[in-house]
């Protein structure tokens, strides 16, 4: 599978962005899809996950600010980022997982939040 993330950019604190991840196959063919992020000098951390039946989970630091969703007709995974903080700065990656296969990551998209 190929995953292509886009939508990152520079935004001021309190602003919003919507990240997109285009998949080369049906987004519901995966057991889970997720967004992760990696800040400079830090390890990658999971931000949000959506299952094949649409169940979503979020990291505690999201605090209701982010929403993961998908368009099953277009095979696109989204991450809506609201009320962004400087600590949200990093490279955001989408990924897909099917039982029996390793998790696949796409290339990242950079989000920079200025104070």
Image: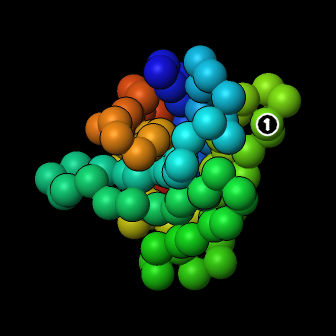
4 left or right, relative to 72? left
Residue visible at 63% across and 67% down in the picture:
56
Q: Is residue 36 left or right of residue 18?
A: left
Q: Which SS class for mark 1?
A: loop
Query: Dot 1, crowdedness within 10 Å: few (<14), some or many (≥20)?
Result: few
Q: Position of residue 2 (x, y in %)?
A: 48, 19
Q: Residue furthest front?
A: 100
Residue shown at the point (84%, 30%) measured from the top left? 73
The image quadrant of residue 99 is top left
Figure label count: 1
User: 16 and 20: which one is in front?
Assistant: 20
- Measured as percent of width and height from the top left, residue 85 is found at 51, 67
Residue 81 visible here: no
Q: Taking 70 as reference, is 60 above or below it?
A: below
Residue drawn where x is 60% and y is 57% of the image: 51
Q: Say if 115 sits above or below 39 in the image.
A: below
**Which of the 4 quarters of the picture holds residue 24?**
top right
Residue marked by disc 1:
72
The image quarter containing residue 68 is bottom right
Q: Residue at x 27, y 54 (%)?
A: 44
Q: Does 94 sit left or right of 64 as displayed?
A: left
Q: Is 64 above or below relative to 51?
A: below
Q: Nearer the viewer, residue 108 or 8?
A: 108
Farthest-out residue, right: 73
Q: Position of residue 63 (x, y in %)?
A: 57, 81
């Amino acid at each position: 599978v190929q995953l292509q993330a886009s939508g990152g950019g520079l935004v001021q604190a309190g602003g919003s962005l919507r990240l997109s991840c285009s998949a080369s196959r049906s987004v519901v063919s995966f057991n889970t899809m997720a967004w992760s992020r990696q800040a400079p000098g830090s390890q990658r951390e999971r931000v949000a996950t959506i299952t094949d039946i649409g169940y979503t989970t979020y990291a505690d630091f999201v605090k209701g600010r982010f929403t993961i969703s998908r368009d099953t007709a277009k095979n696109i995974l989204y991450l809506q980022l609201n009320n962004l903080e400087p600590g949200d700065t990093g490279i955001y990656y989408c990924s897909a997982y099917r039982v029996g296969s390793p998790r696949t990551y796409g290339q990242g998209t950079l989000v920079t939040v200025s104070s």
